Amino acid sequence: GAGVSQTPSNKVTEKGKYVELRCDPISGHTALYWYRQSLGQGPEFLIYFQGTGAADDSGLPNDRFFAVRPEGSVSTLKIQRTERGDSAVYLCASSPGTSGGDLHDTQYFGPGTRLTVL
Amino acid sequence: AQSVSQHNHHVILSEAASLELGCNYSYGGTVNLFWYVQYPGQHLQLLLKYFSGDPLVKGIKGFEAEFIKSKFSFNLRKPSVQWSDTAEYFCAVTTNFGNEKLTFGTGTRLTIIP
């Protein structure tokens, strides 16, 4: 079946501009995660959705970053007033969302969006 | 907060050599442990995971990892590597039920020489 997809695959923007990054999770997955991976680093958690609500946004670096998932499926990560330090690969992952007890979900990652801020 | 350390940044091996990549975590409570792999040009894929039970976990492509609680370690092993194992390997941990956010290490780049 189809995996997690992310669009665009590459985004080049200028400092100060607004960008939106899209994630289409695996169909039926209720949990969705955004991570950011800078060069030479492992992915860093940004935000987690369970259904439509952001269950944990503790990883968002500041209030320029915002994410939504209005219908509990597709999610959009929005970055205002981009800065050069925002340049990274933004990864999305989804999982079935049946956490708790003995059941732990594998997160399935998308290919990422490479954001370059000039 | 939990953290993950991968001390080997770049490992170079010849084909058929044995592999061990180190992973240590810091967290005093119950953890769930993962190894993810990223082949060149591809997205992150799960190699194996440990939640409970037998501390020796077997994953795909002949990989295995051993959870040693007393050492806070979850090292990845493979007895005989292949050129196709060339990739970036990430160790990761989760600690909470209901929020499985992953904390990753910085990764180890593995290069296999034919």
Image (cartoon, rainbow, N blue to C red):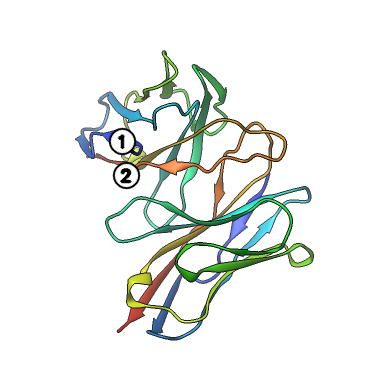
Q: Amino acid at mark 1?
A: Ser
Callout 1 environment at 10 Å: few (<14), some (14 to 19), or many (20+)?
many
Q: Which mark is residue A111?
A: 2
Give the left or right position of residue B52, taking residue B19 as reference.
right
The residue sitting at 40% across, 21% down in the picture is: A73
Horizontal and vertical percent position of residue A67: 42, 22
Closer to the N terminus: mark 1 or mark 2? 1
Secondary structure type for disc 1? strand
Q: Quadrant of residue A11?
A: top left
- Residue sitting at x 55%, y 64%: B6
Rendered location of residue A52, percent (x, y): 49, 16
Q: Are marks 1 and 2 in contact (CB under 8 Å)?
A: yes
Image quadrant for the C terminus of chain A? top left
Apparent side of residue B80 relative to residue A7 in the rendered image (left or right): right
Query: Between marks 1 and 2, how big is the CA–CA gap?
Result: 7 Å
Give the answer, above or below, for where B51 lies relative to B14.
above
Identify the mark at residue A65; answer none if there is no mark. Answer: none
* Above or below: residue A20 compared with residue A107: above
In-front residue for pair A74/A37: A74
Assign a secondary structure to mark 2. loop
Up/down of A82 relative to B63, above or below: above
Tag 1, which chain?
A
Disc 2 residue type (three-letter): Pro
* Residue A113 placement: quadrant: top left
| Residue situated in front as seen by the camera: A86 or A57 | A57
Chain of the residue displaying label 2: A
Say which mark, if any, is on residue A5. 1
